[in-house]
Amino acid sequence: MSGEKTWRPKLILASASPRRLELLQQVGLDADALLPADLDETPKKGELPRVLAARLADEKAEAAAKVAKAHAELTSFYLLAADTVVSVGRRILPKCEVVDEAAQCLRLLSGRAHRVHSALTLITPKGARRHRIVETRVRFKRLSSTELDAYLASGEWRGKAGGYAIQGLAGGFVVKLIGSYSCVVGLPLYETLSLLAGEGYPVHVLWLNRV
């Protein structure tokens, strides 16, 4: 019944990303704690984009789990970590922090296709680890100097892999997308729900409780 609360295990998101939190909430899930990990995300020499995404998701999960285990109120938890990597061929694009970096990324993406890899690591209450990696192909229109300058001036690129946020202004640059839109935002929802439900998290019971 809608007035009753259903018990559920704790769900921890190993991220401070508001986008990932919003995506979880979109599918009826609420994180009990946000435990972002401060990691060196520099790719290893010769590391492929999908390998980097998977490694970072796993390292984020490991770091967050250590913190969670030190808090008595976070016993019996499911812990979800994710990482998103944008690439052109084997070239991994950075999470842009300065405008010149973002401009370089956007000029590279202009008029061509690129790939977005989002990796997931789930740690279950029994300590098991489950992994998924999702790849989406995106093609941008050819950007005019006016569009490029205006987007850079918006500041929306800051902290974003590849220098753009598809859920924002840059959605207007996308000519074609093959795969998962939520993967590009940063948390592939189909795979996230499949992982959680497959490991016994009461995803659909919570949906019923929201009615």
Image (tube, grey):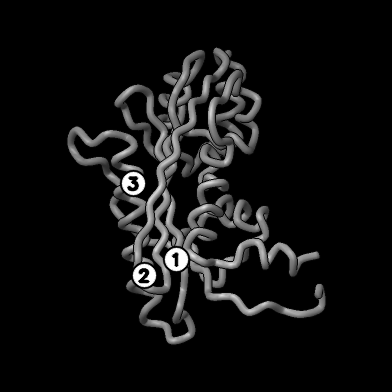
| Rendering coords of residue 172 (x, y %) | 65, 25
Q: Quadrant of the N terminus?
A: bottom right
| Rendering coords of residue 107 (x, y %) | 45, 19
Give the class, few, some or many, for how many residues have Cα within 10 Å of label 2's Cα (few <14, many ≥20).
Answer: many
> Residue, x 57% and y 47% (percent of image)?
189
Question: Disc 3 marks which residue?
Answer: 54
* Secondary element type, mark 1: strand
As drawn, the label of residue 79 is: 1
Left or right: where does residue 123 sit relative to residue 170? left
Q: Amino acid at mark 3?
A: Ala
- Separation (CA) of disc 1 from disc 3: 15 Å
> Residue, x 51% and y 47% (percent of image)?
191
Question: Disc 2 marks which residue?
Answer: 65
Foreground residue among 205 and 123? 205
Q: Amino acid at mark 1?
A: Leu
* Secondary element type, mark 2: helix
| Rendering coords of residue 29 (x, y %) | 63, 62
The quadrant holding residue 134 is top left
Left or right: where does residue 47 sit relative to residue 163? left
Task: Compare marks 2 and 1 and give the one earlier in the sequence.
Answer: 2
Give the class, few, some or many, for how many residues have Cα within 10 Å of label 3's Cα (few <14, many ≥20).
Answer: many
Q: Amino acid at mark 2?
A: Ala
Asked if residue 4 is positioned above or below residue 33 in the image, the reply reads below
Foreground residue among 151 and 42? 42
Q: Are marks 2 and 1 in contact (CB under 8 Å)?
A: yes
Task: Compare marks 1 and 3 and give the one earlier in the sequence.
Answer: 3
* Secondary element type, mark 3: helix
Asked if residue 10 is positioned above or below residue 85 in the image, the reply reads below
- Separation (CA) of disc 3 from disc 2: 17 Å
